[in-house]
């Protein structure tokens, strides 16, 4: 009996020793474990050094949050969590720290932990302003990973926080378009534009989607709308020119491409010389069109690539 009691005591002792935990720099807030005096000294030295470098602990914390996001965007989660932990050490009231933890836990599919840190961040984030930016970045990360369902999830979370947050509607429109969900793509593009009728970026995207669906009249309206909003909006002319080319209106396409050509940078001229050249050939002027294609080769066509451009010249300018 005594041997059994001694054995149980020994097991208990070993269990307690086994459960002893150390701070873990690969977990949010170092695993929420109290640090010993030696580690606290190291922390204080770090705080003192970076505070001198960046002026205040709060400023230093923001710098390390920025580094945390930068690493996270490049999928270096280990480096990211370490930077967010240092940011938390510098300023535990920095809401962006907790949103960083939220993002990391989300990417690991730890929903309950993610939500815990999100709520912690909201305590220091009046109006959810920083929360919206954090979720938007997280949506971008999911987009890079081609997890469109998660992108939608993040967008709807942004809408829950602020129904007027433009970027959420923009993103939904774009990714529904990518998924060829026409009804939802147009729905959310329309909602984004209703929030900001001067949002040329979204109007152009909607026009491009209309064009991809061969809804040419709607596409033309969107491209011309951006031009009416800004007579020097080159993207509007460029897209309208491409639409006219696709419909066989080569003379109108040339006018738009020439307008952009006269205003754009040299490294973009090759594309417009190519399109003018092809339009000219389509109108029956092979010699004149080939001269434009040769100019495209001179400037370089970053859209098509020089090898493909050479092949195009070979096929059309024998």
Image (spheres, grey):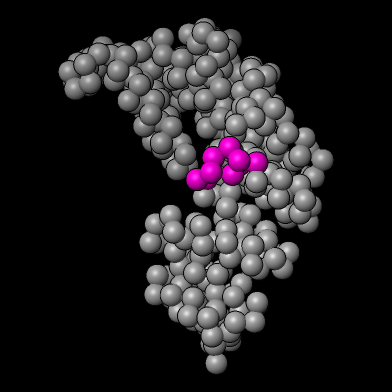
Residue 161 falls in image quadrant: top right
In this rendering, position of residue 220 left or right of residue 91 = right
Residue 296 placement (x, y as % from top left) = 46, 73
Q: Is residue 103 in view from this perspective? A: yes
Name above or below for residue 177 compared with residue 120. Answer: below
Between residues 228 and 120, which one lies in front from this camera angle? 228
Residue 81 falls in image quadrant: top left
Residue 230 placement (x, y as % from top left) = 54, 40
- Segment colored magenta: 225-233
In this rendering, position of residue 163 left or right of residue 70 = right
Give me the residue at 38% from left, 29% from top.
66
Residue 249 placement (x, y as % from top left) = 70, 65
Give me the residue at 72% from left, 29% from top.
191
Between residues 133 and 234, which one lies in front from this camera angle? 234
Between residues 119 and 211, which one lies in front from this camera angle? 211
Q: Is residue 152 magenta?
A: no
Give me the residue at 41% from left, 9% from top.
93
């Amino acid at each position: 009996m005594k041997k059994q009691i001694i054995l149980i005591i020994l097991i208990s002792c070993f269990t307690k020793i086994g459960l002893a935990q150390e701070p873990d720099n690969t977990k949010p807030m170092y695993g929420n474990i109290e640090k010993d005096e030696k580690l606290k000294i190291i922390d204080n030295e770090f705080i003192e050094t970076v505070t001198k470098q960046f002026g205040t602990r709060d400023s230093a914390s923001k710098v390390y949050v920025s580094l945390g996001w930068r690493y996270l965007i490049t999928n270096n989660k280990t480096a990211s969590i370490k930077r967010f932990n240092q940011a938390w050490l510098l300023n535990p009231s920095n809401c962006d720290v907790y949103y960083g933890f939220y993002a990391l836990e989300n990417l690991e599919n730890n929903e309950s932990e993610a939500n815990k840190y999100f709520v912690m961040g909201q305590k220091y984030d009046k109006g959810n302003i920083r929360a919206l930016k954090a979720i938007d970045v997280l949506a971008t990360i999911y987009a890079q990973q081609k997890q469109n369902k998660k992108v939608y999830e993040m967008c709807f979370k942004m809408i829950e926080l602020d129904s007027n947050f433009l970027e959420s509607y923009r993103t939904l429109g774009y990714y529904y378009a990518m998924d060829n969900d026409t009804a939802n793509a147009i729905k959310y593009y329309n909602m984004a534009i209703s929030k900001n009728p001067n949002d040329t970026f979204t109007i152009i995207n909607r026009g491009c989607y209309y064009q991809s669906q061969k809804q040419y009249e709607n596409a033309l309206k969107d491209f011309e709308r951006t031009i009416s909003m800004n007579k020097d909006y080159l993207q509007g002319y460029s897209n309208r020119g491409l639409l006219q080319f696709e419909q066989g209106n080569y003379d109108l396409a040339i006018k738009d491409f020439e307008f952009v050509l006269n205003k754009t940078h040299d490294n973009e001229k090759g594309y417009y010389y190519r399109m003018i050249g092809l339009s000219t050939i389509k109108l029956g002027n092979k010699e004149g069109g080939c001269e434009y294609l040769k100019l495209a080769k001179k400037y370089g066509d970053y859209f098509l690539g020089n090898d493909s451009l050479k092949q195009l010249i070979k096929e059309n300018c024998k």
